Image (tube, rainbow, N blue to C red):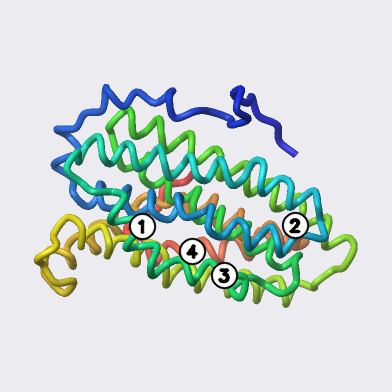
Amino acid sequence: METTNETKDGLPWHMSEIAYDKIDTEQLLKDEPLMFTLAAASFVERASDKYTSELIVHFQDHKEVAGWLQASWEPEEVQHGDSLAKFVTTVWPDFDWQSAYAAFMAEYEPTCSGEYYEEDRGLELVSRCIVETGTSSLYYSIGHYSKEPVLVDLVERIRKDEIRHYKVFLHYFKEYMEKAPAGRINITRAIHRRLDMIRDEDSAMALKYVFKARYPNEPLDSERFKHILKKSTEIIQSNLPIDTAVRMALTPLDLPKHLHNLTERLFTSYARKFAVKAPTA
């Protein structure tokens, strides 16, 4: 597995290294959809401490996985949320992040329960790989879209963490498959289930609560919210590293090389139809 240069508190980097005082707030205040995207991401990332405990219970029979989740994965994910929250409140000093987050968690926390995990632990690990594929792609998209240097630095640090998390989950997934192979059909189904969940949940829910905090007197069916949703989606879709994301998603299937290459081309072509443009990463 990949190693990192850790800070003295065990983190690969620390939010104190981010130059928040050098943020170009004027530039960012002109891009409300981007700020909404960042605020929504901060909510979802910060919520990681709520579902980590359930995930640790799920892997209680594998002490190495449970130990890594508690000692590394959770504090790194929490730092992602905290660092994004500080970025958002630096640009929006009047944004009551804590109250908006609490409102979000009232709806989101029930989805953190273990009932949403794959019963087969190996399949849950492949599900985690898909989550990390999605989050690393999100931060790539933001970094590719934005020209604000401090934000680019921050999201690149987070993206690298998510890629490393993917590699750790993939490592443990392979260990499980060596002991109890799940079969490609079951792995494919687990990937599909997680993709459906990613498509339908977290970010849209979080954006709703960011909007309620910013515009408490406007309904969610307002033209303003529709515009923000549309533009936030475009920021992500038009900058997705589709080639990389497809490759990461297919890797757990361990297909023969010729079949992997064919499948990758087909899925990449299919995915491009749902993006405005798709840079290669």
Q: Position of residue 270 (x, y in %)?
A: 48, 68
Per the image, the residue denoted by label 3 is 113
Residue under the point 16% across and 74% down: 221
Task: Tell which circle, 3 or 1, labels the residue nearer the N-terminal end.
Answer: 3
Q: CA distance from mark 2 to mark 3?
A: 37 Å
Q: Nearer the viewer, mark 3 or mark 1?
A: 3
Q: Amino acid at mark 2?
A: Lys
Q: Position of residue 142 (x, y in %)?
A: 36, 44
Per the image, the residue denoted by label 4 is 269
Give the vertical position of 89 relative to 102 (above or below).
above
Task: Tell which circle, 2 or 3, labels the residue nearer the N-terminal end.
Answer: 3
Q: Mark 1: few, some, or many residues within 10 Å (few <14, many ≥20)?
A: many
Q: Amino acid at mark 4?
A: Ser
Task: Tell which circle, 2 or 1, labels the residue nearer the N-terminal end.
Answer: 1
Q: Position of residue 247 (x, y in %)?
A: 60, 54
Q: Amino acid at mark 1?
A: Gln
Q: Secondary structure at mark 2?
A: helix
Q: Nearer the viewer, residue 62 or 199?
A: 62
Q: Position of residue 176 (x, y in %)?
A: 82, 60
Per the image, the residue denoted by label 2 is 257
Q: CA distance from mark 4 to mark 1?
A: 14 Å
Where residue 237 is drawn, which disc sits there?
Answer: 1
- Say which quarter of the image contains residue 124: bottom right
Q: Amino acid at mark 3?
A: Ser
Q: Are marks 2 and 1 in contact (CB under 8 Å)?
A: no
Task: Tell which circle, 2 or 4, labels the residue nearer the N-terminal end.
Answer: 2
